Amino acid sequence: MPIETKYLLIASMDVASEFENLFNEVYEEHAAYIRQVPGVRHVTRIKGEPFAIMIGGEAKPMAAPDPVYTALYEIDHPKVLTSPEWIAACEAGRWPSEIRPRTRKRAHFVYKVT
């Protein structure tokens, strides 16, 4: 999948297993709000998996990433992330009250596509 913007926001987090089903359900609602923000082009969520990779002729087992859930937001510019529309989208729906308090190991990064 080619990245169509100049910037990529990567947001990673974990959620306790007892809240994982709710997390997955509410994330779809949350992503729909974020997709409506001007300057947000695409939202893709991924979940890390353990795997093995051949390195130097030997299979090396690799653990799932920690945190395991990651969302990729293709954005026009980092200023999108402080816009009134972004702020409103992040506080809309059930995400702030039902999910955000149950997440842990949150990490956010912005990369410029070169």
Image (cartoon, rainbow, N blue to C red):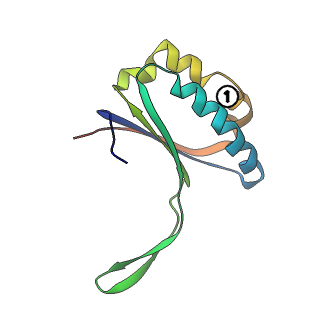
Name the residue at the right extreme. Answer: 18
Relative to 72, residue 51 above or below:
below
Residue where numbered disc 1 is placed = 96
* Observer-nearest of 71 and 63: 71
Give the total number of marks visible in the rendering.
1
Q: Residue at x 65, y 43 (%)?
A: 103
Around disc 1, counting alpha carbons within 10 Å, would you say few (fewer than 14), some (14 to 19), or many (20 or more)? few
Relative to 65, residue 20 above or below:
above
Image-based side of 88 in relation to 101, left or right: left
Q: Residue at x 69, y 24 (%)?
A: 93
Amino acid type, residue under disc 1 in the picture: Pro
Across and down, in percent, residue 13 comes to 57, 46
Query: Quarter of the image holding residue 17?
Result: bottom right
* Observer-nearest of 41 and 59: 41
* Observer-nearest of 25 and 104: 25
Relative to 15, residue 51 above or below:
below
Query: Quarter of the image holding residue 8?
Result: top left
Image-based side of 33 in relation to 18, left or right: left
Name the residue at the left extreme. Answer: 114
Name the residue at the bottom extreme. Answer: 57
Q: Residue at x 67, y 28 (%)?
A: 96
What kind of element bears circle 1? helix
Across and down, in percent, residue 6 comes to 29, 33
Name the residue at the front extreme. Answer: 1
Image-based side of 40 in relation to 33, left or right: left
Across and down, in percent, residue 18 comes to 78, 52
